[in-house]
Amino acid sequence: MEKPLSPDDLPIVNGRIYHLDLAPEELARDVILVGDPDRVPLLADELLAEREADRFHRGFRTITGVARETEMRVSIVTSGIGAPSTEIVLNELAALNEIDFSTLTRKESFEPLNIVRVGTSGGLNPATPLGALVLTDYVIGLDNTGLFYDVPLPDAACAYLEEQARTVLDRAAQPGARFGGTLAPYAARADRDLLTALEQEAAELGITHVRGITISSPGFFAEQGRGVARIGSTVPGLLDALERLESGRLNLYVENLEMEAGVVLHFLGGLGYRAAAVCAVINKRNEKAFMADYRRQVCAGARIALRAFRRLRPEAGPQLMAGRGTWRES
């Protein structure tokens, strides 16, 4: 039997977990994760018929309620920007679901959470239009947050993507760069059933979408090839390098660049939770195009997430069908 956690391992104040300021009963089994705290009330106004909890603490907003369309309970939660902030939120969501707060011990049984990151991203595939939704099949994390969680490789495709990403980053590194050759990408994949449900719902609603590979960056500037600071970049041709990444064996394209999906799919996959990511393409740097008002696209992503949650329930509708992204050996 596991030893109880100590209060410094899992801070709880007045029955609420520290950063999110949530009590266990205020978290739904189905969770939509968004980066910007302002998107939480936006999606709640758009999607919820009623609210039962609304918490805002340390920049993290959570609203739990019943969805108007699906009549199912859902929590809309802020992840913050980037992997370090997201890692805090993911740990607290898992603790809210798995830990008995009265004893600080893990429950004997608990239902896995279903979590979909809904956000925005930059487009890397010239063929994918501005405003399209990218459903992440596989993700390559460039942050080091995921490296602190020793999750086994999900499949052979992840091993292949990690090798390809290391190769292109090493080759693109600035000669003589202090950290050249030290970047260690990791790969993860979306839950297969949840991903297929998202794709089916997007198709049923007629929402423009693609299924592909996501690059998850640890930052916004040098980490995404933006040379703004007066400091040299370790990988100055980062975007070009990523676009050259070989993914042909997967029958998928490198589609988009964002900042949270890597640690979301890596960490939650390691826990055995269902996790996926849906991001609107709002920026295409090869076209110098930017979509300033993307609320409709974010709401569409959240809507297909809600409908996918419903589809996954045993009593809900038709059986899931196999999707693309099938690995084939060379």
Image (cartoon, grey):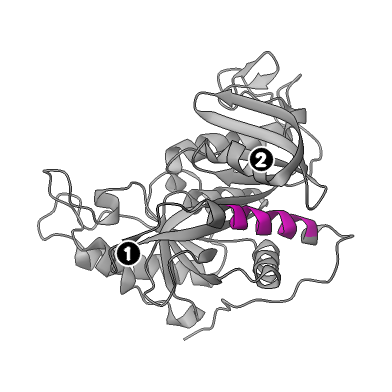
Q: Does residue 137 appear in this view?
A: no
Which residue is the extreme one toward the right?
Answer: 315
For the N terminus, give its image quadrant: top right
Residue 210 vertical placement versus 116 (above, below): below
User: Is 54 situated above or below 264?
Assistant: above
**Is the magenta region chiefly helix, strand or loop?**
helix
Q: In front: 207, or 256?
A: 207
For marks 2 and 1 on the same chain, the one whose residue lies earlier in the sequence: 2
Q: Can residue 82 be seen here? A: yes
Q: Outermost residue toward the bottom?
A: 330
Residues rendered magenta in the picture:
299-310
Q: Regarding mark 2 in the picture, which secondary structure is present there? A: helix
Residue at point 90% right, 60% down?
Answer: 315
From the viewer's perspective, is 263 left or right of 104? Answer: left
Mark 2 or 1, closer to the camera? 2
Question: Residue 85: x and y, percent?
Answer: 46, 36
Give left or right: position of 117 versus 159.
right
Residue at the location (26% across, 48% down)?
A: 221
x and y percent of residue 92 in the render?
61, 33
Amino acid type, residue under disc 2 in the picture: Asp
| The stretch drawn in magenta includes residue 306 | yes
The x, y position of residue 212, in whole percent, is 50, 70
In this figure, which residue is indicated by the disc labeled 1? 166
The spot of residue 185 in percent (x, y) is 38, 57
117 vs 225, left or right, is: right
Q: Nearer the viewer, residue 168 or 283?
A: 283
- For the point 20% across and 63% down, the residue is 237
Vertical position of residue 103 compared to residue 92: above or below: above
- Badge 2 density bin: few <14, some 14–19, many ≥20, Cα 10 Å: few
- The foreground one among 72 and 288 is 288
User: Which residue in the structure is indicated by mark 2?
Assistant: 45
Q: Secondary structure at mark 1?
A: helix
